Image (cartoon, rainbow, N blue to C red):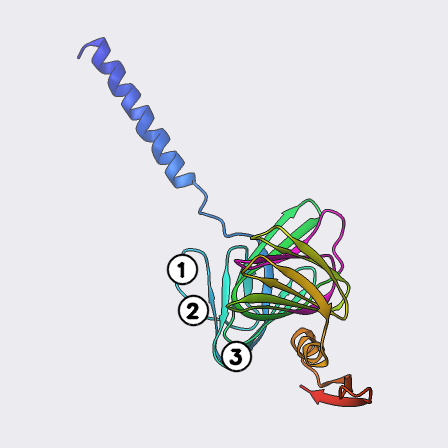
Amino acid sequence: MGDCEMTNNVHLRVLLIATCALLLGAAPPTKEATIALVSKVILDVTRKEVGKDWQAAKRGETLSSGERVKTGDKSTAVIKFKDNSMLRVREKTEVLLGGSQQGKSFSKSTGVERGVIGFSIKKQQPGEEFRFSSPTSVASIRGTSGQFGVADSSDKLIVLEGLVRLTNKISSQYVDVNGGFTGISGRDGKVKVRPSTPEEKLAAQLASRTGDRDSKLDIELDNGSGNKKNIEIKFK
């Protein structure tokens, strides 16, 4: 055997050994870091991990960035993020969860293709944000509660407390929506803000409530003639 052929064989053996070592020592693909968990499941709730099929969601399961959660008819899912911010995913709603950690800053996002979510967002620290998005709008939240809904003609943001900037993606126009007000972002590019109706406030309070214990709401209703009445609603 010539020197050249021997050298080639040696190189081939070294290459094979190195390749096997790499394959055997390679770490398995790592799952995205946990950003939230399923806190409550009522009736038909499913989740979809990246690269997998839809499967039934169970209370206590962790969620990673890029996962989807979907609810069926008369169904609800409660999702809690690592910073204790909460989403209540109402019936017939699908959301895409996102999150990234840079140092101590934890930014979060929720994409809503259709449906309604209630939210109670903890005050965000410097460098953090929580964003809701739809095909039409982006809502930038610093810490507040309310409800965000996506319909065929427009998106509706009801703010109970705090301040949310609602931006229309089509026109880039935006409004700042304070507590007690409702923002509307339309498919025509228009965006506006107005006082919330009693019905909208009630819907947002029910959607954004936290905890599983019995609770109550005190609502002030106006009959349109200047007469006001306080009612108490108890719910579970």
Discs 3/1, front = 3
Q: Are marks 2 and 1 in contact (CB under 8 Å)?
A: yes
The x, y position of residue 27, in whole percent, is 46, 43
Mark linked to residue 42? none
Mark linked to residue 55? 2
Label 3 neighbour load within 10 Å: few <14, some 14-19, many 20+:
some
Q: Is residue 136 above or below residue 43?
A: above
Question: What residue is shown with label 1?
Answer: 52
Which sits earlier in the primary sequence, circle 3 or circle 1?
1
Residue at mark 3 to residue at mark 1: CA–CA distance = 22 Å
Secondary structure at badge 3 equals loop
Which residue is farthest front? 225
Which sits earlier in the primary sequence, circle 3 or circle 2?
2
Q: Is residue 195 above or below residue 136?
A: below
Q: Is residue 178 above or below residue 75?
A: above
Relative to 183, 111 lies left or right: left
The quadrant of the rendering that contains the N terminus is top left
| Snapshot quadrant of residue 112 | bottom right
The x, y position of residue 160, in whole percent, is 74, 70
| Snapshot quadrant of residue 211 | bottom right
Residue under the point 59% across and 52% down: 171
The x, y position of residue 32, in whole percent, is 53, 52
Magenta region: 123-147
Residue under the point 49% across and 49% down: 30
Relative to 5, 225 lies left or right: right
Question: What residue is shown with label 3?
Answer: 75
Q: Are marks 3 and 1 in contact (CB under 8 Å)?
A: no
Q: Are marks 3 and 2 in contact (CB under 8 Å)?
A: no
Q: Amino acid at mark 1?
A: Lys
